[in-house]
């Protein structure tokens, strides 16, 4: 299911402890770490997809978490060129996501990464709330910064000082003009790219 702009609907999950630290997991057979996320089925709402992905990737059930809130509307990121499969019938250039903030209310022993035949993760740990912005793969840093920035006020209601403010280095990932991620698809210019070239001579 890909929209006319080439983005696949997806949900992302920020699972938080009472102290403000968040669930951070390593992908199977890869060195990359990320939040749980996954694509939506055509017959699912974002909330339904979120709970399904939560169980598939972490083993947690709705009874183990409290839903604190979600990002308003879609947040988008583009895939790097090497990850775009150009031979497919529908070209997918990236993901559009709704991000959810959950608080763990059950014991963390309920986290089980092997709930499917093809687990997404093989290891996990708790990290500071803003840590993922600087440590996720580069092309996702912009959308991570935007998602956590939207969700931080909700997180502070629960965790208070455990969340803090976005570090200065992480802020660069969501500033306008940064190529790491963006919220809206870029409009394609319809103007022809022809005309005189201007050269500067020193």
Image: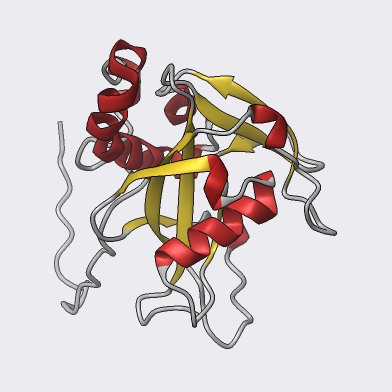
Examine the image and state in which quarter residue 47 appears: bottom left
Q: Is residue 91 left or right of residue 155?
A: right
Q: Which quarter of the rendered picture does the C terminus lie within?
A: top left
* Residue with the most extreme bottom position: 89
**What percent of the width, then of the height, locates residue 54?**
59, 51
* Residue with the most extreme top position: 161
Q: Is residue 58 left or right of residue 178?
A: right
Residue at image location 75% in from the left, 40% down from the top: 112
Q: Let me know if residue 180 appears in the view.
A: no
Total marks shown come to 0
Q: Is residue 47 left or right of residue 35?
A: left
**What percent of the width, then of the height, locates residue 5?**
35, 76
Question: On screen, 17 above or below 76?
Answer: above
**What percent of the width, then of the height, locates residue 191?**
16, 77
Residue at image location 31% in from the left, 29% down from the top: 155
Q: Let me know if residue 87 appears in the view.
A: yes
**What percent of the width, then of the height, locates residue 192?**
19, 78
Question: On screen, 145 above or below 39?
Answer: above
């Amino acid at each position: 299911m890909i929209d006319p702009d080439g983005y696949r609907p997806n949900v992302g999950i920020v699972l938080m402890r009472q102290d403000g630290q968040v669930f951070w997991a390593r992908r199977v057979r890869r060195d990359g770490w990320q939040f749980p996320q996954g694509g939506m089925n055509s017959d699912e709402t974002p909330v339904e997809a979120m709970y399904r992905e939560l169980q598939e990737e972490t083993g947690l059930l709705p009874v183990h978490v409290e839903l604190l809130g979600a990002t308003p509307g879609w947040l988008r990121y583009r895939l790097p060129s090497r990850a775009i499969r150009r031979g497919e019938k529908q070209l997918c250039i990236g993901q559009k996501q709704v991000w959810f903030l959950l608080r763990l209310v059950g014991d963390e022993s309920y986290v089980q990464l092997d709930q499917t035949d093809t687990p997404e993760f093989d290891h996990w740990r708790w990290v500071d709330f803003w840590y993922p912005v600087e440590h996720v793969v580069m092309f996702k840093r912009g959308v991570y910064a935007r998602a956590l920035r939207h969700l931080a006020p909700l997180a502070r209601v629960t965790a208070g000082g455990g969340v803090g403010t976005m570090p200065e280095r992480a802020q660069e990932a969501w500033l306008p003009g940064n190529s790491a991620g963006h919220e809206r698809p870029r409009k394609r210019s319809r103007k022809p790219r022809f005309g005189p070239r201007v050269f500067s001579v020193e």
